[in-house]
Amino acid sequence: MWRQIKRDIQVIFERDPAARSVLEVILCYPGFHAILLHRIAHFFWRKGFKLLARLISQFNRFLTGIEIHPGARIGKGLFIDHGMGVVIGETAEIGDNVTLYQGVTLGGTGKEKGKRHPTIGNNVVIGAGAKVLGNICIGDNVKIGAGSVVLRDVPANCTVVGVPGKIVVRDGRNIADAQVSEIDLRHEDLPDPVAEMLLCLQRQIQRLERRIEELEGKSLELTSLQHADGLQGKVRTS
């Protein structure tokens, strides 16, 4: 338990440059408080004290603004930055060294029973306001852009953006062997598929405009030649 707490504090220093001291982390980081209280609630949940576990999780939500169901399974090194509005469902599973920003939802869809929440791999970064919904799997080393809505499985080493989420980078950078300190947290520096599509359309329009200008130029030359031939014919006739 103490080793786990020590690890939870360590990852904050690794991923948040604003952290100054251990005391500040213990007193002022709601993500740390939420994870600590969840581990306690999850212990009672596994022991069969369901109501007590839910009460602890509700107190956790009241204290931190982060709602984690006591049944959720969380690996080592989870970092919840700011955390207000984060929701993690009952059957969600989170791997090691995962980073969640504020407003992230790992939720379910519909009223189905059993496994209905996502499974998150290792070294995953989920941007602010992103929603990952349903019984889907997010592979290792995935980045999900802020505000994205992910409804389908995502393979490892991918970048996902948009609504619904689309894979825009795959195996662009393989970080399967990266250490915790090398986790890529730049979730704001992601491709924009809509902007790229508009740029492609703009280039196509420019090509068409150049082609039209070329055809108009040829048409003018042809008209001039025909006009010159007509004048020559009149001169000969006269």
Image (tube, rainbow, N blue to C red):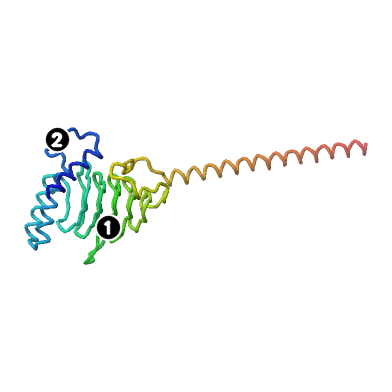
Residue labelled with disc 2: 24
Give residue 81's position: percent from left, percent from top: 22, 42
Q: Are marks 1 and 2 in contact (CB under 8 Å)?
A: no
Nearest to the observer: residue 225 or residue 102: 102
Nearest to the observer: residue 54 or residue 109: 54
User: Does 174 sit left or right of 1 as displayed?
Assistant: right
Nearest to the observer: residue 96 or residue 82: 96
Q: Residues within 10 Å of mark 2 (few under 14, many from 20)?
A: few
Residue labelled with disc 1: 119
User: Does 37 sit left or right of 13 as displayed?
Assistant: left
Residue at horizontal 19%, vertical 57%? 72
Residue flagged by tag 1: what amino acid is it? Thr
User: Does 235 sit left or right of 48 as displayed?
Assistant: right
In the rendered structure, find residue 103 and report the number of the disc placed on it.
none
Residue flagged by tag 2: what amino acid is it? Glu
Gap between marks 1 and 2, in whole Å? 31 Å
Give the vertical position of 25 relative to 44 (above or below): above
Q: Residues within 10 Å of mark 1 (few under 14, many from 20)?
A: many
The local secondary structure at tag 2 comes to helix
The local secondary structure at tag 1 comes to strand
Q: Residue farthest to the bottom?
A: 113
Residue at horizontal 9%, vertical 58%? 44
